Amino acid sequence: MAKKLKTRGVNRTNWVVFVILMLGSLLMIFPFIWMILSSFKTVSDVYTYPPKWLPSSWKWDNYKTVFDMIPFGIYYLNSIYTSVVQTILMMGIAVCGAFCLVFLDFPGRRPLVSLIRSTMFVPMVVTLVPMYLLVSKLHGVDTYAGIMLPQVFSGFTIFLLVSFFTTIPKDLCDSAKLDGCGYFRILWNVVLPNAKSAMSTAALFSFLGHWKSYTWPLIITNKDKYRTLPIGMKYLVQESSSEYQVMMAASVMAILPVLVIFVIFEKQLVKSITLTGMKS
């Protein structure tokens, strides 16, 4: 009898938690549903009070209007190109840096760790002026290199990978050394296969950070040819200040790559969050 009462109590608790999570999920997904539905509305539907969930007529022309108002395609392709290349470069630097900090013992290692860690506490605003002066001296204004290269180093990404690399038994690396493997083969054949979840998480965070980057691309670009999507969204707001349905259509298109990346790396992301709560 006591077991039945206990089981009922647990079930009631589970139902309460389930209801709370469902309500939280609805609150989180509500803005996205509203954004998608609003992107198909007419001007009258947008300003109707009380607000209408469904559009009176589905207006697909809102998406075409975005491309008519601004060179949205150029901004979109620039963001995809710069975000992907920056993510690849950042991951390459972070992987090599994390491997060296975890598996190699060399003079000056501790000061280097402190130096890299200190970069995480320096606001970007402090480095904007000297970074712009340096890039302009190197003729990097209005170039893809000027947009990407100053943003490929991340102390956060390095230490995120360090936290995962430390969970890999060093005996595996020692065994690989005995088999005649060099450091690059150990990294490629031993470390990376055991850190897929960490790599996916770091790549996801890196892509999201570069995709929504606004301040630096705004400063370093003057031509539409090199401007990225966040800057383009700003110009769209200026062009369509009263046409919210057009801005919603642009927002839907802007969020699609992020959703695709999240779907691809979702399992690895959940796995990495689970592993962070386990003891090595």
Image (tube, rainbow, N blue to C red):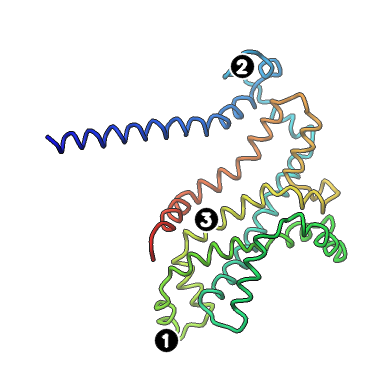
Q: Amino acid at mark 3?
A: Thr
Q: Which residue is the extreme one toward the top?
A: 49
Q: Amino acid at mark 1?
A: Leu
Q: Nearer the viewer, residue 271 or 81?
A: 271
Label 3 – label 1 distance at C-alpha? 31 Å
Tell me the mark number nearer the camera, choosing from 2 and 1: 2
Q: Which residue is the extreme one toward the left?
A: 1
Residue 223 rendering spot, x and y as whole percentages: 85, 48
Residue 165 rendering spot, x and y as whole percentages: 48, 68
Give SS at disc 1.
helix
Residue at 59% across / 78% down in the picture? 109
Residue at 74% across / 29% down in the picture? 65
Tell me the mark number nearer the camera, choosing from 3 and 1: 3
Give SS at disc 3.
helix
Compared with 182, 267 (above or below) is above
Return the mark for residue 178.
Answer: 1
Quadrant including the C terminus: bottom left
Residue 76 rendering spot, x and y as whole percentages: 71, 44
Q: Which residue is mark 2?
A: 51
Quadrant including the N terminus: top left
Q: Nearer the viewer, residue 64 or 255?
A: 255
Q: Which quadrant would residue 67 be assigned to in this image?
A: top right
Q: Earlier in the sequence, mark 2 or mark 3?
A: 2
Label 2 – label 1 distance at C-alpha? 70 Å
Query: Is the residue marked by circle 3 packed among few (<14), some (14-19), or many (20+) residues within 10 Å?
Result: many
Q: Which residue is mark 3?
A: 201
